[in-house]
Amino acid sequence: MYVAVKGGEAAILASLEQVDAARRGDRALAAISVAQIREQMRLAVARVMAEGSLYDPDLAALAIKQAAGDLIEAIFLLRAYRTTLPRFGTCSALDTSDMLLQRRISATFKDIPGGQVLGSTYDYTQRLLDFTLLAEAAAVPALEAVAVEPEASPRVADFLAAEELLARESDDDGSPPPDLTREPLSFPASRAMRLQNLARGDEGFLLGLGYSTQRGYGNSHPFAGEIRHGWLSVEYLPEELGFAIDIGEIEITECELFNQFKGSATVPPQFTRGYGLAFGHAERKAMAMALVDRALQAEELGEPVAAPAQDIEFVLYHSDNVEASGFVQHLKLPHYVDFQSELELVRRLRREYQGRQECSGEPE
Amino acid sequence: MPVPDTDRKRQRWLSVLARADAASFDERLPLERLPAEYVWLRQPESGLVMVCGRAGGTGSAFNLGEMSVTRCALRLTDGTVGMACLRGRDSLHAQRAALIDALMQQAGQDDSLEQAWTTWITPLEARQLQQRIARAAAAAKTRVEFFTVVRGEDAS
């Protein structure tokens, strides 16, 4: 049983001042602005939006500033903020084939309609520290414009699914998907509930789990069918209008993985799929999500459920870093009374143990 | 449900207004010509819209996460109702968008829609098109052709 403590008010207030001072750092340097974080730390902003489950680059940047760069703390701040706002409604489901692509690659086909576009990626950098950035002298190349014809870029999965070489996704029955912000996790968890959980899930946790499936804990042989990143319009039907309107663009990353599947009694051999979708430019997150999404389909596909990444309850109950961080860090709270009772118990057990030792040590 | 033609036009200007940034309002539009007299039907209010994806891009819908949205509605003195619903938390943006929405509807009624479009929508749309082209062009520069390398033992 946890027994509360009181007192320490002055010290706590002083500690809050220390938070502000420590965040500010050396006052001889200019303070960093929220706009600078938004524009120059966009990948951190993307992670905070995805796991904070709120698309708002300004607020995500503010949260990063306030949390002094602690992204899990920033995610917590964003989650807390969203609870203060009313929900107006739900947008029409995104059609990612409409994306204005900034990056799009496929590891399964060289030639795909619309082409492969590398965009901005660290994949081909040499991971050497760039000391020109330290000198703040790095010249930023101005991108010169080239004439482009907008080209349709249908999703790779769609043309494989049309040939039935890839599993088709089940049709949408039109019912509203379960919403983890309104109802607790329940089992058996539907695919929609799993995907929402993974979309909000901790990137590090999902990355580790996804990695484990590649190393043999879950028998997964994925191909990166397609990874795309870009801009997508969000359509919403306001209650006062009879038609949906475009309420603005969001930046989004999608990953589709294809996995081997030998088929079953009712399904011919075909590739199965794992799906990842995340706010912002968040490729590693989308890939990890897709790996775990596929692993969690083990039971439905008649595969043995033996590895941690295939265990739906284990994965879904431990993916949320706000919950995990809260429960781990609550250990820092004073547990004085708790510990006293445990201490008393251990002392009593030791007395009994010593009593038995003395008894058995006596000559018969 | 098909959207009637007049609604389709409104759909388009509402989209352009929603995507506009503060700078393009300030620099490109004659904001002094916005009506000064109106009553709020709904004061600008920030809230959330849940964004849905689909499993595998085409399957059943799932909740991805929310986005911040601001909406408002107002009525001009002649009774025209303008509204706005757009991404972000900028209430000034929503207010201006709703006023322009009302002006556009007024113009639609007295056959001056084309002129109103040129005044209020074209400058914003042009800037948005420019940005779209710039983004597409930047991506196009990194378009890549991969070649499969033929291995020695395969070459005959």
Image: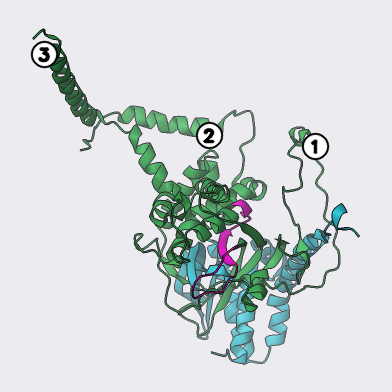
Residue B50: give its label: none
User: Magenta region, mostly helix, strand or loop?
Assistant: loop
Is residue B60 or residue B152 the one in the foreground? B152
Query: Quick one: label 3 or label 1, which is nearer the N terminus?
Result: 1
Name the residue located 24 percent from the left edge and 32 percent from the top edge: A6
What residue sits right under mark 3 in the picture? A359
Q: Chain of mark 2?
A: A
Horizontal and vertical percent position of residue A156? 68, 69
Q: What separation in Å lies between label 3 and label 1 (alpha carbons)?
A: 80 Å
Kindly state the secondary structure of the residue where label 3 is placed.
Answer: helix
Q: Chain of mark 3?
A: A
Can residue B136 be seen at all in this image of the molecule? yes
Q: What separation in Å lies between label 3 and label 2 (alpha carbons)?
A: 61 Å
What residue sits right under mark 2 in the picture? A23
Q: Residue furthest right?
A: B156
Query: Quick one: label 1 or label 2, which is nearer the N terminus?
Result: 2
Amino acid type of the residue that numbered disc 3 sits on in the rendered structure: Cys
Chain letter, colour green: A
Name the residue located 78 percent from the left edge and 73 percent from the top edge: A150
Q: What separation in Å lies between label 1 and label 2 (alpha carbons)?
A: 26 Å
Residue A327 image-quadrant placement: top left
Name the residue located 57 percent from the left edge and 30 percent from the top edge: A25
Q: Which residues are magenta?
A: A260-284
| Magenta residue check for A302 | no
Q: Chain of mark 1?
A: A
Horizontal and vertical percent position of residue A310? 46, 55
Chain B tint as drawn: cyan
- Foreground: disc 3 or disc 2: 3
Q: Quadrant of the C terminus of chain B?
A: bottom right
Amino acid type of the residue that numbered disc 2 sits on in the rendered structure: Arg
Kindly state the secondary structure of the residue where label 2 is placed.
Answer: helix
